[in-house]
Image (spheres, helix red, strand yellow):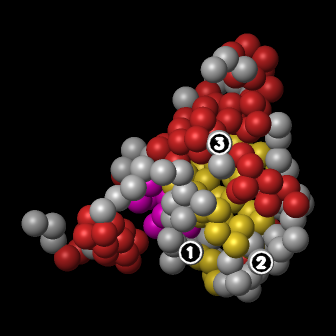
Amino acid sequence: MSDASSLTRRGLLGGAAGLAGAMLGRHTAAAAPHLGEDGLYTQDWYVDSFLDLAEDLTAATAQGRHFALQWSQRGCIYCKTLHTSYFADPAIEGPIRAAFDIVHLDLFGAREVIAFDGARLTEKALGQRERIRATPTFQFFALEDGKAREVARMPGLLPQAEFSAMFRFVAAGAYARETFEAWLAREGRKS
């Protein structure tokens, strides 16, 4: 039994979701994209976050998973392609879903986000501070010496092979040794 001091909002939410999944029976079919009332596409396997990014990164790291933010905006045709085409392909979606916790943010959104440094900002203000210029953009983060560090960034939608390769690059920790371009030229195009 765990002690109450180790409980987090995210853990409680995840436990409730797990219990609901067990009661309803899990299915293994690929998830369909969801178009929200806000006009943004997302995946049902993305992290249901309280938008406390340090908490989300810590939770992902504790579970041996990698962490990314995915930025979108209403009407973005590349965001729609990401969710309806790329993630519809189990060869792309499966490995990413298995290894990454992804939090979805709206480049022009008004939800409050607690940034890694503790600042409370709207999604829009955080996007401006992070210099997000295109959507979809993925920012990849890792904990280094107890602090969040952006280890890779994918601005815009790469072709499918390179898109998948970026996630493999991050999952392998190759960012600590070389650039994505160097890694991709050497081994990233391998299946």
Q: Secondary structure at mark 2?
A: loop
First along the sequence among labels 2 and 1? 2
First along the sequence among labels 1 and 3? 1
- Looking at the rendered structure, the kind of residue marked 1 is Leu
**In screen coordinates, is 149 left or right of 145?**
right
Where residue 50 appears, as percent x and y from the top left, is 51, 77
- Residues under labels 2 and 1: Cα distance? 19 Å
Quadrant location of the N terminus in the rendered image? bottom left
Question: Is residue 92 shown to the viewer in this render?
Answer: yes
Q: Are marks 1 and 3 in contact (CB under 8 Å)?
A: no
Q: Are marks 2 and 1 in contact (CB under 8 Å)?
A: no
- Looking at the rendered structure, the kind of residue marked 2 is Gly
**In screen coordinates, is 151 left or right of 133?**
left
Give 33 or 7, whichever is nearer the viewer: 33
Q: Main secondary structure of the magenta part?
A: helix
| Magenta region | 53-61
Which residue is the extreme one toward the left?
1
Q: Secondary structure at mark 1?
A: loop
Question: Is residue 145 shown to the viewer in this render?
Answer: no
- Observer-side mark, 1 or 3, equals 3
- Observer-side mark, 2 or 1, equals 2
**What's the residue at 82%, 78% (across, down)?**
108
First along the sequence among labels 3 and 2? 2
Q: Which residue is mark 3?
A: 89
Q: Which residue is mark 1?
A: 51
- Looking at the rendered structure, the kind of residue marked 3 is Asp
Is 33 located above or below residue 66 in the figure? Answer: below
**In screen coordinates, is 90 left or right of 110?**
left
Q: Secondary structure at mark 3?
A: loop
Q: Which residue is mark 2?
A: 39
